[in-house]
Image (spheres, rainbow, N blue to C red):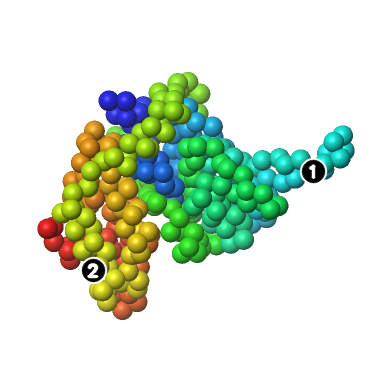
Amino acid sequence: MLLDGIVDRLGDIILGKEHQLRLALTCLLARGHLLIEDLPGVGKTTLAHSLAAVLGLHYQRIQFTSDLLPADILGVSIYNRDTAEFQFHPGPVFSHIVLADEINRATPKTQSALLEAMEEHQITIEGETRNLPQPFFVIATQNPLYQIGTFPLPESQLDRFLMCIELGYPDAKAERELLRGADRRTLLAGVEPLMSTGQLLELQKGVDSVHAADALLDYLQALLEFSRQSPRFQNGLSPRAGLAVLHSAKAWALLAGRDLVLPEDLQTILPAVVGHRLQAAEDQAANLTGHERVRLLLESVPLP
């Protein structure tokens, strides 16, 4: 299957992280955006570049800094003396894959410049709405908040990311292969696209046709309802979060070569989709990680 070949090719570059690679590809198929929160140097940027290379997509990297302005992302109009008119120069957001590197090092004003782009796949600047290329996929990397010079992402911005994952350190076998192997930049330079843009858009449309049975929707609604009623959580999961879980589960099933969503699909993608949305109550071990909060949710709601 073509998608399996893409996962295998990505695995040749990002070693020992097949699950995270499948989640990233699932996020793209579901037309969402991906947030990667981890320490510097574990392969976050390489993952974004690898996806663009293997899928044959136009790729732009934006390095977020404290002095970055919204116009540096969206673009700006510059006066053209020859035509006596202002001419719009598109910013790096006009790409298929946009890497917002260290997004939480920029100020909230600059972070919010991506909100409309991520939600509507368009931007409005100087009173004119401009559509972004399709597919449009934002991969943002975020440094841990205890590091110097970081600004926490507001909840409204976090909610725009379909998934939040961590790469983590490689295991001993993968790290030995990384140390002995070729430089990742050299490998990326030789990558040939395995899919056309048209094929990817067709696959994204195909996610909607994956079937979710009523029993699975009952299970999803039970999870949502428990998160809203339980005193263990500050706020329950929103309807948008429920749709995000369903779309991600469908994309995961499609990636597995099925046209039907299984409960295991939903359980597999749940930590990545709701871990950054679900907050524990202050008196209920608020220091739990996202995966621990999701495990608490899954253990509390039985399968139908």
209, above or below 120, in the image: above
Please determine whether, in this image, residue 87 is positioned above or below residue 240.
above
Going 71% across and 40% down the picture, which residue do you hit? 89
Tell me which residue sits at (35%, 64%) in the image.
Answer: 238
Q: Looking at the picture, which amino acid does disc 2 mark?
A: Phe
Q: Which residue is mark 1?
A: 86
Q: Quadrant of the C terminus?
A: bottom left
Circles 1 and 2 in contact, beta carbons < 8 Å: no
Res 284 seen here: yes
Q: Residue at x 68, y 53 (%)?
A: 127
State the mark number for residue 108. Answer: none
| Left or right of 4 in this view: 54 | right
**Residue displayed at 76% across by 40% down:** 87
- At mark 2, the secondary structure is helix
Mark 1 to mark 2 CA distance (whole Å): 54 Å
Callout 2 crowding tier (Cα within 10 Å): few <14, some 14–19, many ≥20: some
Residue 109, position as x, y percentages in the image? 62, 61
What residue would you read off at disc 2?
Answer: 226
Say whether residue 1 is left or right of residue 127. left
